[in-house]
């Protein structure tokens, strides 16, 4: 890089769907993001692989699809230490890397490496709360050492959506989600106002969200999974909600233990669909209570209290991986794998029932895989341009790094690739976007591919899983499944999807192609920062 490198602010709105932030016909009011787009470039057709948080962040920060980085679900997976993050490259270039995250993004997921500060906070710490005021003050006063790279993960759009009182009327949106978008945009305006002019700002979502205006039709993959899991008999989120009282670290350990057990479950035929009797439900609650901590009145008073709840989580050890491992180990010994698996299958179906309403995690429709992307750079980027060409989530950081002068060749063998040539009017080819849902049980696994013209999904391990083919140009709402009418196109797109898998199958990637000098530079810089010894 030549000259002083710009700061980089990557803002990721959890559950941020593209059509509510960019384009015409929106009921939300977003003057601040609109202004950002007028000062930079926007890509309304940015496609994620999955519709859930943790794998999407792993893809953002590695430039790899899940088939190579190995993080497939929200809980229960962690990024291998063999796989460096793109923030390692930024650290090697002299950047100070910071992250402000929430939801499932615990440091034990393996996403915290190369960050000087990886600050996990309770989901109730929003930009409009005391935590947001503290974060803005740090931006304003130069708390973060320049040049810095900041990942800011925001939870305002996630159910329970945050709508400040002044935005809770039809002027700011027809739905609660739209009003939450308007409310969040006002808070983003506060952020944009305090960052220095030499800051590259990128705004995107990790995945989208289903709204009440969308429905799941009979004969689709979601309908098939609902019937196979007997979801209509499940309780909603009750068992899962009990488990969450144990804290996010215990929940991560719970899933890490259960996921291997689920690999051998088959729902078809005699299958492993869970029993939903009242006695089983009662025993689930009793067992899960062993994982939950003692709760004191003064702790209850701080639930959903900004900043204070995060302090409670830390003080009570609910963000302590070692304590969570010990607690889970005792739990497994007392319950046993067979009963644990049966209980977990009921929890799985219950969470699926809830997600049918909330929308993300269980499908690959555009409303959950199409996210906004707006980039404003200090120099080298045209103003007010928007491209309807399809770009992909693993392309985002390589493009940002290209804009700040880091050669794409430095990033090694990753799936993402810079689309800076598109912005500059140079030859550029749109690559297909890989799509997947990790079933576990594998009867429910779904893979697919999205091109600018079509989307195709199928069950790689289950021939009974409905295939879905949509002509996105003529049917952007994905309402007419063409799979039965166009079997040849389905076969072609299935081969394309399978060609995007690693040659040796789905497995964590080995270390990216980083030179010895570059690795030494990374380690030297991290030592100077006190990150490693």
Image (cartoon, grey):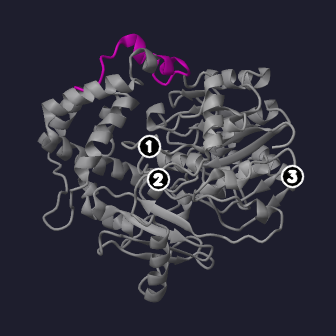
Marker disc for residue 509: 2
Range shown magenta: 290-311
Q: Quadrant of residue 516?
A: top right
Magenta-drawn stretch contains 413 = no
Q: Are marks 1 and 3 in contact (CB under 8 Å)?
A: no
Q: CA distance from mark 1 to mark 3?
A: 35 Å
Q: Secondary structure at mark 3?
A: loop
Residue 471 higher or lower than 135, as above or below: below
Going from N to C along the chain, the mark reached first, 1 or 3, is 1
Give the percent coordinates (x, y) of residue 368.
53, 57
User: Where does label 1 land, which residue?
Assistant: 80
Name the residue rendered at 48%, 49% in the picture: 55
Name the residue rendered at 33%, 30% in the picture: 250
Give the percent coordinates (x, y) of residue 264.
21, 56
User: Where does label 3 land, which residue?
Assistant: 380
Q: Are marks 1 and 2 in contact (CB under 8 Å)?
A: yes
């Amino acid at each position: 890089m030549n000259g002083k490198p710009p700061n980089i602010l990557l803002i990721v709105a959890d559950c941020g769907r593209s059509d509510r932030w960019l384009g015409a016909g929106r009921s939300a009011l977003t003057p601040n993001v609109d202004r950002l787009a007028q000062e930079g470039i926007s890509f309304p057709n940015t496609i994620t692989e999955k519709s859930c948080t943790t794998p999407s962040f792993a893809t953002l920060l590695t430039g790899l699809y899940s088939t190579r980085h190995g993080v497939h679900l929200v809980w229960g997976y962690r990024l291998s230490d063999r796989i460096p993050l793109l923030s390692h490259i930024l650290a090697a270039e002299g950047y100070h890397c910071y992250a402000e995250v929430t939801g499932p993004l615990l440091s034990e997921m393996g996403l915290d490496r190369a960050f000087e500060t990886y600050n996990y906070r309770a989901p109730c710490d929003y930009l409009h709360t005391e935590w947001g005021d503290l974060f803005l003050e740090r931006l304003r006063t130069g708390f973060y050492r320049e040049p810095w790279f900041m990942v800011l993960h925001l939870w305002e759009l996630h159910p329970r959506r945050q709508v400040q009182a002044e935005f809770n009327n039809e002027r700011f949106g027809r739905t609660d989600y739209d009003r939450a978008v308007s409310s969040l945009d006002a808070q983003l305006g506060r952020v944009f106002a305090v960052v220095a002019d030499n800051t590259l700002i990128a705004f995107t979502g990790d995945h989208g969200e289903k709204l009440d205006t969308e429905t799941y039709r009979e004969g689709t993959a979601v309908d098939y999974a609902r019937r196979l899991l007997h979801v209509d008999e499940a309780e909603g989120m009750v068992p899962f909600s009990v488990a969450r009282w144990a804290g996010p670290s215990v929940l991560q350990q719970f899933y890490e233990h259960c996921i291997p057990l689920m690999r051998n479950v088959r729902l078809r035929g005699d299958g492993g669909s869970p029993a939903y009797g009242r006695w089983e439900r009662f025993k689930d609650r009793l067992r899960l209570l062993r994982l939950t901590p003692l709760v004191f009145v003064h702790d209850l008073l701080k639930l959903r209290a900004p900043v204070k709840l995060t302090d409670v989580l830390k003080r009570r050890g609910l963000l302590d991986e070692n304590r969570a491992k010990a607690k889970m180990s005792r739990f497994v010994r007392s319950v046993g794998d067979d009963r644990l698996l049966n209980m977990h299958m009921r929890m799985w179906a219950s969470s699926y029932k809830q997600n049918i309403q909330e929308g993300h995690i269980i499908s690959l429709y555009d409303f959950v895989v199409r996210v906004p992307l707006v980039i404003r750079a200090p120099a080298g980027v045209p103003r007010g341009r928007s491209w309807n060409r399809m770009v992909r989530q693993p392309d985002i950081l390589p493009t940002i790094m290209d804009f700040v002068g880091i050669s794409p060749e430095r990033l090694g063998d990753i799936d993402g690739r810079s689309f800076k040539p598109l912005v500059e009017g140079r030859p550029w080819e749109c690559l297909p976007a890989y799509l997947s849902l990790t079933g576990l049980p594998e009867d429910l696994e779904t893979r697919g591919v999205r091109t600018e013209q079509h989307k195709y999904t199928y069950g790689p391990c289950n021939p009974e899983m409905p295939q879905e083919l949509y002509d996105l140009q003529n049917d952007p709402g994905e309402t007419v499944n063409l799979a039965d009418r166009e079997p040849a196109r389905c076969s072609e797109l299935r081969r394309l999807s399978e060609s995007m898998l690693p040659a040796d199958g789905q497995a964590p990637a080995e270390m990216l192609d980083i030179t010895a000098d570059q690795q030494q530079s990374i380690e030297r810089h991290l030592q100077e920062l006190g990150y490693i010894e």
